[in-house]
Amino acid sequence: MIRISTIFIAICMVLVAASLGLVLHAVAGFSGTESAIVALTALTFLILYNAVSMRLRDRSDVGGQIADLSRGTADLARQVAEFGRRLAAVEGRVVSANSASSDRIQAVLGEINELGGLVKQLAISVASHEDLLASGAAATPPAPSDGPHSEPPEQPAIVPEQAAPIVRPAPVAAARPAPSAVAAEAASPSRSQPQLLAAVKNAVEESRLDIYLQPMVTLPQRKVRFYEAVTRLRDDKDQILAADDFIATAEAGGLIGKIDHMVMLRCIQVLRRLMVRNKDVGVFCNVSAATLGNPANFAQCLDFLEANRALAPSFVLEFKQAAFRHLGPTEIENLAALSQRGYRFSIDHVTDLRIEPRDLADRGVRFIKVPAALLLDPKQSSTSDIHPSDLSDLLGRFGIDLIAEKIEGERAVVDLLDYDVRFGQGFLFAPPRPLRPEGASATGGTTANKESGTPNGSSSTVPIASPAAESPMRATGNAALARRAAGPG
């Protein structure tokens, strides 16, 4: 566009010069040479005028652009300075905040260290007082009872909010076996095999089968989470036969299948009663491997468990470790049938820690009960494939919970907490307590509950061990937790 306008201006100047020469030649009488000279002079003047005017115009345009550029540069510099000021302010605030946070952290760390020292001192003091009280109580013999039916002294109970709902208690006389029953239980191994078999057969036929419940509690809260059903038989003289005394005889005599079916029936009744008050409670029921291997007995138990399939998540079938390791094809197939119906399994009577958690989890095992003495035995770290302190974590990776059983002392609880054991069972928490004859409730207290005005005589606490079953002095567990907080020193 600029080039076209320049050409147009040049043509106009040539025409103006030529026209001026012609006018001078025609009007003033100039000759052709003079007219041409005048025309060229005018053309030169016009060219010079145009160049000068264009130069001045370009200079003014460039000056305006330079002025605009200067103003833009000044604005940019001002904005950069503003951003620099704001950045410096932000950096100052960050430094101030970091300094304040560091001061606060140091103050909190100082308070935590001071609190840790106080807790350690308190733990040492509480532990020493507990040891003194325990030694003093052990040196003091228990006072003799006034009669064979005298009530036991009031026992400490776990607070209701830490205990699962327990069904109604039976009288104290039923909670503690009579002296003759204890003597018979101790002397039962001296019976001959035919006599013991006859006693077991008569007890099964006449339904003289009692269920005792022993709680399993969470650690360290000691809240009841499960109950284990312990089976006892009574002969014609009401002498008690423990499970270890009659199980082998019942298996040899072909009676174990009927006993397992009766125990399952009682356990399901108890579980239904417990779940009315607490949906999170569960019951462990011991089952013999002989029942799995007998098609007729297993079919009867399977039909019963199928009818109660809705209770499968809360009903755990328990097997011995030795029996579980030597299952045959028939037993494995029947075990898989139970697992398909949603039932879970537990392993007890553990004698060593050579455990394959993956294989057990594939077969439906969700709990393993290990004696506390076995877990805390230093020799196990060298004889087993894994250190006992890592066993709970290993089993947890495969969905199996570790339960420490046969816990009888507070110090064992403290050591087990370091092993990350979630559940505990033993006489420290409560001994096995019998159900009422109808199998619908558990003994959870003494007759003092009725006298204290508890409705229907029910107990809101976990069953407490009788004086003959528990140690002379029971700690509440707070001292044990404090001793654990104090550390090994």
Image (cartoon, grey):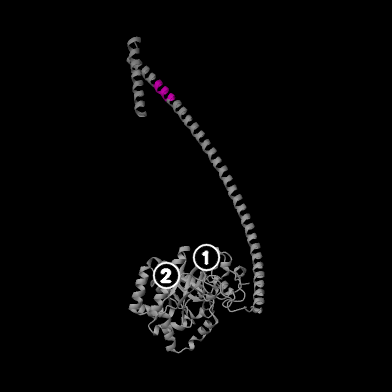
Residue 397 seen anywhere in this rendered image of the structure = no
- Side of 383 where 478 appears, left or right: right
Q: Residues within 10 Å of mark 2 (few under 14, many from 20)?
A: many
Residue carrying label 1: 456
Residue 149 magenta: no
Judging from the image, what secondary structure is the residue with disc 2 in?
helix
Of tags 2 and 1, which is closer to the observer? Answer: 1
Residue 49 magenta: yes
* Vertical relation: 402 (above or below) 17: below
Kind of residue at badge 1: Asn
Judging from the image, what secondary structure is the residue with disc 1 in?
helix
Kind of residue at badge 2: Ile
Magenta-tinted stretch: 44-53
State which tag comes first along the sequence, 2 or 1.
Answer: 2
Residue 92 in picture, x, y percent from top left = 60, 47
Instruction: Look at 46% across and 28% down and name the residue there.
Output: 59
Q: Residues under labels 2 and 1: Cα distance?
A: 23 Å
Residue carrying label 2: 268
Locate the N terminus and report the quarter of the image it occupies: top left
Residue 278 in picture, x, y percent from top left = 48, 63
* Vertical relation: 230 (above or below) 161: below
